[in-house]
Amino acid sequence: MARSQESFSKKEREKKRQKKKKEKAEKKEQRKADAPEGKSFEDMLMYVDEFGNLTPTPPDPSKKRKVRKEDIEISVPKQGALPEQDIVRKGTVKFFNEEKGYGFIIDKDTKDSIFVHANGLVDEIRENDRVTFEVVMGQKGPNAVGVKLIT
Protein backbone atom coordinates (compact mmCIF):
# COMPACT_ATOMS: atom_id res chain seq x y z
CA MET A 1 0.00 0.00 0.00
CA ALA A 2 1.40 3.41 -0.97
CA ARG A 3 1.98 6.20 1.52
CA SER A 4 0.28 9.53 1.23
CA GLN A 5 2.32 12.16 -0.66
CA GLU A 6 1.26 14.90 1.74
CA SER A 7 3.40 15.20 4.84
CA PHE A 8 2.41 16.89 8.07
CA SER A 9 4.44 20.05 7.32
CA LYS A 10 2.83 20.41 3.87
CA LYS A 11 -0.62 20.23 5.47
CA GLU A 12 0.34 22.84 8.07
CA ARG A 13 1.71 25.23 5.41
CA GLU A 14 -1.48 24.87 3.39
CA LYS A 15 -3.58 25.58 6.50
CA LYS A 16 -1.55 28.75 7.22
CA ARG A 17 -1.87 29.91 3.61
CA GLN A 18 -5.65 29.41 3.65
CA LYS A 19 -5.91 31.21 7.00
CA LYS A 20 -3.94 34.23 5.70
CA LYS A 21 -6.08 34.33 2.56
CA LYS A 22 -9.26 34.28 4.67
CA GLU A 23 -7.95 37.07 7.01
CA LYS A 24 -7.00 39.22 4.01
CA ALA A 25 -10.49 38.81 2.53
CA GLU A 26 -12.06 39.75 5.90
CA LYS A 27 -9.91 42.89 6.16
CA LYS A 28 -10.88 43.89 2.62
CA GLU A 29 -14.57 43.48 3.44
CA GLN A 30 -14.12 45.49 6.65
CA ARG A 31 -12.45 48.36 4.74
CA LYS A 32 -15.31 48.36 2.23
CA ALA A 33 -17.86 48.48 5.04
CA ASP A 34 -16.06 51.33 6.84
CA ALA A 35 -15.40 53.38 3.70
CA PRO A 36 -17.63 56.46 3.54
CA GLU A 37 -19.64 56.21 0.35
CA GLY A 38 -20.62 59.33 -1.50
CA LYS A 39 -18.07 61.60 0.16
CA SER A 40 -17.80 64.84 -1.79
CA PHE A 41 -14.56 66.25 -3.12
CA GLU A 42 -14.77 69.18 -0.66
CA ASP A 43 -14.91 66.76 2.28
CA MET A 44 -11.68 65.12 1.13
CA LEU A 45 -9.65 68.36 0.89
CA MET A 46 -7.13 69.37 3.56
CA TYR A 47 -5.75 72.88 4.09
CA VAL A 48 -2.48 74.21 5.47
CA ASP A 49 -2.76 76.79 8.27
CA GLU A 50 -0.32 79.66 8.99
CA PHE A 51 1.86 77.34 11.11
CA GLY A 52 2.19 74.67 8.39
CA ASN A 53 -0.23 72.18 9.98
CA LEU A 54 -2.91 70.32 8.01
CA THR A 55 -6.50 71.18 8.94
CA PRO A 56 -9.89 70.27 7.45
CA THR A 57 -11.07 73.92 7.66
CA PRO A 58 -10.03 76.53 5.09
CA PRO A 59 -7.63 79.25 6.27
CA ASP A 60 -8.90 82.61 7.52
CA PRO A 61 -8.63 85.14 4.64
CA SER A 62 -7.78 87.95 7.09
CA LYS A 63 -4.49 86.20 7.99
CA LYS A 64 -3.44 85.88 4.36
CA ARG A 65 -0.23 87.69 3.37
CA LYS A 66 0.68 89.03 -0.05
CA VAL A 67 3.93 87.72 -1.51
CA ARG A 68 5.57 89.29 -4.52
CA LYS A 69 7.10 86.86 -6.98
CA GLU A 70 10.33 88.92 -6.99
CA ASP A 71 10.78 88.17 -3.27
CA ILE A 72 10.82 84.40 -3.77
CA GLU A 73 14.34 82.94 -3.90
CA ILE A 74 14.64 79.45 -5.29
CA SER A 75 18.41 79.15 -5.06
CA VAL A 76 20.71 79.43 -2.09
CA PRO A 77 21.00 83.10 -1.04
CA LYS A 78 24.37 84.73 -1.55
CA GLN A 79 26.49 84.90 1.57
CA GLY A 80 27.33 88.37 2.78
CA ALA A 81 30.80 89.53 3.70
CA LEU A 82 32.13 87.80 6.79
CA PRO A 83 33.11 90.07 9.66
CA GLU A 84 36.84 90.72 9.82
CA GLN A 85 38.46 89.05 12.78
CA ASP A 86 41.55 90.45 14.37
CA ILE A 87 44.47 88.71 12.68
CA VAL A 88 46.70 88.81 15.76
CA ARG A 89 44.95 87.25 18.73
CA LYS A 90 45.84 87.20 22.40
CA GLY A 91 45.65 84.28 24.77
CA THR A 92 47.13 82.28 27.62
CA VAL A 93 49.17 79.10 27.36
CA LYS A 94 47.08 76.34 28.93
CA PHE A 95 49.57 73.53 28.48
CA PHE A 96 52.92 73.10 26.74
CA ASN A 97 55.17 70.02 26.73
CA GLU A 98 58.72 71.01 25.74
CA GLU A 99 59.84 67.38 25.26
CA LYS A 100 57.08 66.58 22.77
CA GLY A 101 56.98 70.08 21.31
CA TYR A 102 53.27 70.86 21.42
CA GLY A 103 50.64 72.44 23.63
CA PHE A 104 47.41 74.45 23.72
CA ILE A 105 46.56 78.13 23.98
CA ILE A 106 43.23 79.48 25.27
CA ASP A 107 42.04 82.39 23.09
CA LYS A 108 41.22 85.45 25.24
CA ASP A 109 38.16 86.50 23.19
CA THR A 110 36.55 83.24 22.08
CA LYS A 111 37.81 80.98 24.92
CA ASP A 112 38.65 78.34 22.27
CA SER A 113 41.51 75.91 22.82
CA ILE A 114 43.98 76.21 19.93
CA PHE A 115 46.77 73.73 19.20
CA VAL A 116 50.34 75.08 19.07
CA HIS A 117 53.42 73.23 17.81
CA ALA A 118 57.04 74.09 18.56
CA ASN A 119 57.52 74.97 14.86
CA GLY A 120 54.99 77.81 15.27
CA LEU A 121 56.87 79.49 18.15
CA VAL A 122 58.86 82.72 17.89
CA ASP A 123 59.68 82.89 21.63
CA GLU A 124 59.95 80.07 24.15
CA ILE A 125 56.73 79.64 26.13
CA ARG A 126 55.64 77.99 29.37
CA GLU A 127 52.28 77.35 31.02
CA ASN A 128 50.26 80.45 32.04
CA ASP A 129 52.32 82.76 29.77
CA ARG A 130 50.33 85.49 27.99
CA VAL A 131 51.00 85.35 24.24
CA THR A 132 49.98 86.80 20.87
CA PHE A 133 49.47 84.49 17.92
CA GLU A 134 47.84 84.03 14.53
CA VAL A 135 45.46 81.19 13.67
CA VAL A 136 45.71 79.01 10.56
CA MET A 137 43.55 76.00 9.75
CA GLY A 138 45.44 72.73 9.86
CA GLN A 139 44.30 69.21 8.92
CA LYS A 140 42.72 68.60 12.32
CA GLY A 141 41.58 72.13 13.17
CA PRO A 142 42.96 75.55 14.09
CA ASN A 143 46.69 75.88 14.78
CA ALA A 144 48.52 78.80 16.39
CA VAL A 145 51.53 80.18 14.51
CA GLY A 146 53.83 83.13 15.12
CA VAL A 147 53.44 82.72 18.91
CA LYS A 148 55.16 85.57 20.80
CA LEU A 149 55.32 86.38 24.51
CA ILE A 150 53.59 89.56 25.68
CA THR A 151 55.96 91.64 27.76
Image: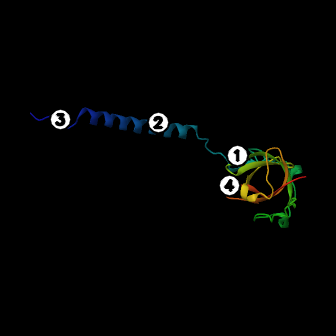
Q: Mark 3 to mark 2: distance in Å?
A: 33 Å
- Position of 26 with respect to 123 (left or right) is left
Which amino acid type corresponds to the residue marked 1 in the rendered image? Asp
Report the Cα–Cα distance between label 3 and label 1. 59 Å
The chosen color scheme is: rainbow
- In this rendering, does residue 18 appear at all? yes
Labelled pair 3, 2 in contact (Cβ < 8 Å): no
Under circle 2, the secondary element is helix
Q: State the mark number for residue 43.
A: 1
Q: What amino acid is at disc 2?
A: Glu
* Chain-order first, disc 3 or disc 2: 3
- Disc 3 crowd rating (10 Å Cα; few below 14, some 14-19, many 20+) is few
Residue position for label 3: 4
In the picture shown, does residue 95 fall above or below 9? below
Distance between the alpha carbons at the discs numbered 4 and 1: 59 Å
Q: Which residue is mark 2?
A: 26
Q: Is residue 48 visible?
A: no
Left or right, residue 3 beside residue 117: left
Locate residue 98 relative to residue 2 in the image: left or right. Answer: right
Amino acid type of the residue tagged 3 in the rendering: Ser
Q: Residue at x 84, y 62 (%)?
A: 82
User: Disc 4 marks which amino acid?
Assistant: Lys
- Asked if disc 2 and disc 1 are in contact, CB closer than 8 Å, the reply is no
Q: CA distance from mark 4 to mark 2?
A: 62 Å
Report x, y in % for residue 19.
39, 34
Asked whether disc 4 touches disc 2, contact meaning CB atoms under 8 Å apart, the reply is: no
The secondary structure type at the circle numbered 4 is loop
Q: Position of residue 64 (x, y in %)?
A: 86, 53
Dot 3 lies on which element? loop
Disc 4 target residue: 140
